[in-house]
Image: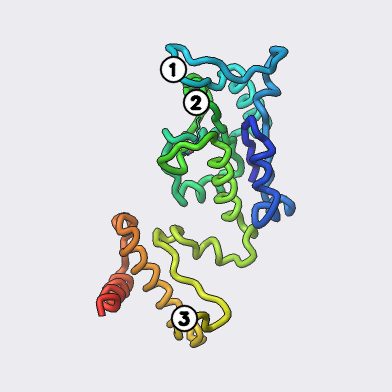
Amino acid sequence: MQFSVITLFPELVESVVAEGVVGRAEKRGLMELKCVNPRDFTEDVHRTVDDRPYGGGPGMLMRPDCLLKTIRSERERLGKAKVIYLSPQGKPLEQSMLQALSEEGSAILLCGRYEGIDERVIDLEVDEEWSIGDYVLSGGELAAMVVVDGVTRLLPEALGHKGSAIEDSFTDGLLDCPHYTRPERIEDLDVPKVLLSGNHQHIEKWRKKQALGRTQLRRPDLLQNTELNESDKVLLIEFMKEIKT
Ligand SMILES: Nc1nonc1C(=O)NCC1CCCCC1
């Protein structure tokens, strides 16, 4: 997977590959991250990347000329890469979008700063606009790092245990079940006995029931989009009865 991140703050974005799963994936060549600074595509002596908005208004905008040059340079380098602009005006990010991008092989992530970018850049060169949530950050870099992290962990061999990414929350449209590790008892709280039973069928059933119940209680909206099979419906009914007792 090849990422090109267009940003005025390359060091900020490069920190995402400093540690952990993403860092190891980059070191193992599963993923490549290149940050490109639009300032390197300016032609004036002051290397100007921003300017005042037409029509007045607060703040500055990123200029279209250097952004278009940067995007086109990276399109040429990467070939058929999709250009994704991170902004609050974008499509809300979901796991399925990360999964799809992880199968694309490359992506160009465009990070805005100031009050945003000239709309003509979006008209001419942005394929998709994505949002990581309904709030405003100081720049698109953190959103781009979320995408890099979320995609990289889905790459085959990126996670130690193959099953991890597949069993994640949201992969099956549900929230994750509770997890426990040693010690067995802490502050009078015990690990659920089924997890100590060694009976993998019972453990799998308990985990699915917990995931279904949690989703119903915390994010019933997710269940609207999920077709439950008969056994899952029974598990959910059992869970809801148990919490009422
Ligand atoms: N929310 C978000 N999801 O993706 N990006 C987001 C963001 O808040 N980005 C910062 C803004 C800052 C002004 C320019 C355009 C990007």
The residue sitting at the front extreme is 187
Q: CA distance from mark 3 to mark 1?
A: 57 Å
Query: Is 100 rendered above or below residue 57?
Result: below
Q: Are marks 2 and 1 in contact (CB under 8 Å)?
A: yes
Q: Are marks 2 and 3 in contact (CB under 8 Å)?
A: no
Q: Which mark is residue 189?
A: 3
Q: Amino acid at mark 3?
A: Leu
Q: Amino acid at mark 2?
A: Glu
Query: Is 75 rendered above or below residue 45?
Result: below
Q: Identify the residue shown where x is 60% and y is 23%.
A: 67
The residue sitting at the right extreme is 27
Residue 95 in view: yes
Mark 1 lies on a secondary structure that is loop
Residue 201 in view: no
Q: Identify the residue shown where x is 47% and y is 46%.
A: 97
Q: CA distance from mark 2 to mark 3?
A: 50 Å
From the viewer's perspective, tell me whether residue 173 is left or right of residue 143: left
From the viewer's perspective, tell me whether residue 26 is left or right of residue 96: right
Mark 3 lies on a secondary structure that is strand
- The residue beneath circle 1 is 57
Query: Which is in the foreground here, disc 2 or disc 3?
Result: 3
Q: Are marks 3 and 1 in contact (CB under 8 Å)?
A: no
Mark 2 lies on a secondary structure that is loop
- Its colouring scheme is rainbow
Mark 3 residue crowding within 10 angstroms, few (<14) / some (14–19) / many (20+): few
Q: Amino acid at mark 1?
A: Gly
Q: Disc 3 or 1, which lies upstream in sequence?
A: 1
Place residue 229 in its image quadrant: bottom left
- The residue beneath circle 2 is 115
